[in-house]
Amino acid sequence: MDENIKILKGLGLTMYEAQAYITLTSLISATATEISEKSEIPRSKIYNVLKKLYEKEYIEIEDGRPLTYNVKSPIEVISREKEKLNNRIDDTITTLTNVYENGMSQVQAPIWRIYGVEKIINQEVEIIKRSKTSVNMRIGFLFENEAESLIKTFKSNRNLKVNILASPTCYINYKEVNIIKMFKDAGINIQKADIPFVKVLISDSKEMMHTYTKFSEDKREVIPETAIGIWNKYEDVARNYDERFMNQLEKMKMKKRNK
């Protein structure tokens, strides 16, 4: 199937409607007979197809004998439909997220294991996006593309208070990466700390995720296929970890002030 037809069908047109619109974009203005012949849509179907395109505001009809059908600009039409689709998607995300979060709050044992680097990063991003006030992180290592995803998500919510304690560097694809510099350059609050080979993300003192992985023998390179995330929505546990994090952060600040 032609890619343009697939896209137009995704915007709500039928196969014949998509064919007719694409045909008319090359003709600009034409009669039903001309459109039928060039698009190979049966003449018995073409009038109803063109009527539907008019109702959906893809074309205009000019009075006359016979009627003339004029195409509307693809920029105007498809941009309008794209905006409608995006609005519907946003509404669906909001609705389903509310359902999801209500369901999550009723789960009796809210602890899940997440396997795979991509799924772990996606879950971290989802947790951050749900955060209302604060995110605290301990970063002992990073996966490939993880820092970029975290930074982008943090930047999308400037009202979020972010604190990160991190090892100075880690290795990704056998190259040394300066963790502190990456986040500082992006304007994210981060401080150097002695962090073991583990990662912890705590959101609003309500949920958290531990991430573990095995490393190569020289303890430098992550072995991605061994990565596992432990996502925990026990608020008492998350709050306890958050308090310990803030105590550590405060001690570090006091130490700096006393120097």
Image (tube, helix red, strand yellow):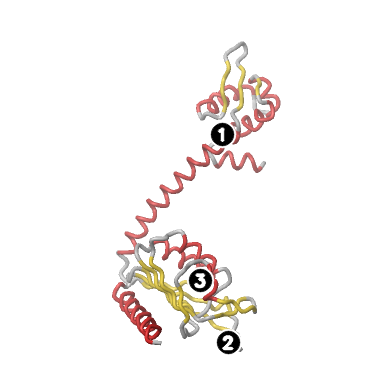
Question: Marks 2/3: CA distance?
Answer: 25 Å
N-term-proximal mark, 2 vs 3 = 3
Locate residue 239, reporting x and y percent: 31, 75
N-term-proximal mark, 3 vs 1 = 1
Question: Marks 3/1: CA distance?
Answer: 42 Å
Location of residue 9 by image quarter: top right
The residue lying furthest to the right in this view is: 38
Which residue is the site of mark 1?
76
Q: Amino acid at mark 3?
A: Lys
Which residue is the site of mark 3?
184
- In the picture, measured across the screen, residue 251 lies left or right of residue 156, that is left
Locate residue 53, reporting x and y percent: 55, 28
Q: How many residues crowd around disc 3 within 10 Å: few (fewer than 14), some, or many (20 or more)?
A: few
Quarter of the image that includes the C terminus:
bottom left
Label 1: state its secondary structure.
helix
> 32 or 140: nearer the eye?
140
> 233 or 184: nearer the eye?
184
Which residue is the site of mark 2?
219
Q: How many residues crowd around disc 2 within 10 Å: few (fewer than 14), some, or many (20 or more)?
A: few
